[in-house]
Image: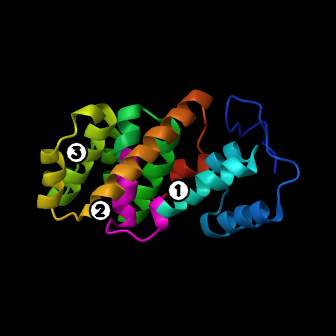
Amino acid sequence: MTETSNERVTALGLGVADPLSEATQAYFAKCEEKLGLVPNVLKAYAFDEKKLRAFTDFYNDLMLGESGLSKLEREMIAVAVSSVNHCYYCLTAHGAAVRTLSGDPELGEMMVMNYRAAELSERQKAMLDFAVLLTEQPEAIEEEDRQALRDAGFSERDIWDIAAVAAFFNMSNRVASATDMRPNREYHSQAR
């Protein structure tokens, strides 16, 4: 797997480990089968398979593992955080996921631009308000902010998951921005 001249993944010339392990090749083949592509974020990390495994293990646990948050809610957090951080990669990739999971292209666009413009449940609004506060002013989080999540129906574990997803995407946004990571072109047309 190599970058083509038409598909630059990052501004860094790190390339992909050569050869990729059988496990990584199988993982990329599974991505191709399920998604129709290998997300460029995975290609970006593929210069170091240890870093790639750490990233994918944490991502898969947060975004696909057991949680009181739906997959859509977790993607909504990713988009709200990425909107604050102006992360082109994550807004494109996770905006497409919101469109796909919700079946609503308008929701995906509103989430990318300003989640407050979307018709959200009180639960979703509380969740996103917390994720954005954690992104913009982590030092300002107080017990009343956690209590607002409890009042909206979130469990203690859900609050942990909201914080973990928001924190993960703050880190991912910064790596993507620092390296000028580019989303797969396919994301632009998904679920429209």
Q: Amino acid at mark 3?
A: Asp
Q: Is residue 22 left or right of residue 34?
A: right
Query: Neighbour class for label 2 at 10 Å: few (<14), some, many (≥20)?
Result: some
- Which label lies toward us, 2 or 3? 2
In the rendered image, residue 75 lying in the magenta stretch gets the answer yes
Residue 124, given in percent of the width and then of the height, sits at 23, 56
Q: Check disc 1 and report the residue beneath it.
A: 59
Q: Which residues are magenta?
A: 62-79
Secondary structure of the residue carrying numbered label 2: helix
Quarter the C terminus occupies: bottom left
Q: Check disc 3 and report the residue beneath it.
A: 129
Which color scheme did the rendering employ for the protein? rainbow
User: Quick one: label 2 or label 3, which is nearer the N terminus?
Assistant: 3
Q: Is residue 36 visible?
A: yes
Q: Check disc 2 and report the residue beneath it.
A: 158
| 90 and 153: which is toward the camera | 153
Q: Amino acid at mark 2?
A: Asp
In the rendered image, residue 120 lying in the magenta stretch gets the answer no
Residue 38, given in percent of the width and then of the height, sits at 67, 56
Q: Which mark is residue 140?
A: none
Residue drawn where x is 31% and y is 53% of the image = 107
User: Quick one: label 2 or label 1, which is nearer the N terminus?
Assistant: 1
Q: Amino acid at mark 1?
A: Tyr
